[in-house]
Image (cartoon, rainbow, N blue to C red):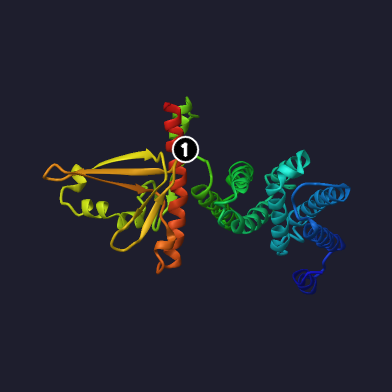
Amino acid sequence: MTAYFEDYFKTAENVSMQAVDKLGLLEDSCMELDQLADRFIGGRIVDDNDKTLVKKLYKAIFDAQSALDDVLSDPETRTVDVTQEEELIASVMERIVENRKDLGAMSMFVQKWWITNLASINKENYGTYMTKINSWTTTLRDHVLRDLDNHPGLQRWYNSLLNNYFTILLNNASKFSDKLPQGVEKTLLDNAIKTAHDLIQDFNLGWGDKEDVAFPAPPKDEVERINRMPHAYRDKYNISFQHPLSWDAMSINNNYWWMSKQPDFAEKAKFSLLIADKDKTYTNPRTAASYTIKKGDVVMYVEYVDKDGKKHFADIPLFINKAYFSNASQEDLDRIDRINRAQRKFANRLKKQLDYIK
């Protein structure tokens, strides 16, 4: 038995056998799930042993989640810290999502069942909503706010989980809260709902496809849908819709640096967003620092005509190269990551706009 469960039984008075059974079932179910997850390496199912293991894994997920729901919905047991159990279940679900192409249709059913279950509660009351929202907000935070840049499958999974199913739970909780009298319970529940919505917003700013602002009606056509595609990000102090050019490229490119120092640069320079038609590397002749533009990248073409009529230009990419800023603080590196994620969204939207025009 986990140390927390043992402490619970030592300190709790008059613990019913029903509570003991529920916590024991949760522990046993999660132990079985943990053991099966250790044996599941992913990839193609090649023989009957693989099929048997996967079937057992699915059943273990059902059993563990059902046992968890029983614990969270019981006033006698829902004060128990089940973060470890929720983390285990969420981690196993991630592995199923990442291997769903190899696992087939049954894995899709399991995923659908699990996220639908996340949106529901067994008993509608204050304690059940508070416990489920708080516990899952804590558990999901480490999963949805980590680096998902190279995991498009998980991006789609959490996008659906948070913006559809978890949001349903929060909306139902809000309706329940509206019926509560003013007081401590209502305040605590409203705060828990807001914290969960903040988590969803933080995910959406990084990887979600939810529109940045609320619109009163769906887009009327494809052009409007594309124009509504999200591109905001959380900058240092607020949410920003401004997309800077690559900080390193602007300092590396001598032409851009010289142009930007001219008094009339802001007034006379022309800026055009283009799609690179070939690979290109720029190297600073003095410092040997360089940056590379790949074919298909979105770049800003900057053109400036000086007082003598001579034309100057520079191609500046959107993405910031963290390696160029070797002395940057972790806070600044995290900021660069957020900006680059927003640049990907912005570039994707621009490419779709250009494709539509073609």
Write the residue at 78% across / 54% down. 70
The x and y percentages for residue 294 are 44, 46
Of all residues shown, which one is farthest toward the front? 285
Q: Quadrant of residue 103?
A: top right
Callout 1: helix, strand or loop? loop
| 111 displayed left or right of 233 | right
The x and y percentages for residue 218 are 50, 29
Q: Which amino acid, by three-letter code, is at mark 1? A: Met
- Label total for image: 1
Q: Quadrant of residue 8?
A: bottom right
Of all residues shown, which one is farthest toward the left? 308
| Front-most of residues 255 and 331 | 255
Q: Quadrant of the C terminus?
A: top left
The answer to whether one can see residue 14 in this image is yes
| Front-most of residues 149 and 74 | 149
The x and y percentages for residue 186 are 58, 53
| 294 displayed left or right of 6 | left
Write the residue at 35% across / 50% down. 244
| Front-most of residues 180 and 210 | 210
The answer to whether one can see residue 216 in this image is no
| 21 displayed left or right of 220 | right
The x and y percentages for residue 250 are 31, 54
| Front-most of residues 84 and 309 | 309
Mark 1 nearby-residue class (10 Å; few <14, some 14–19, many ≥20): some
Q: Quadrant of the N terminus?
A: bottom right
- Return the residue at label 1: 229
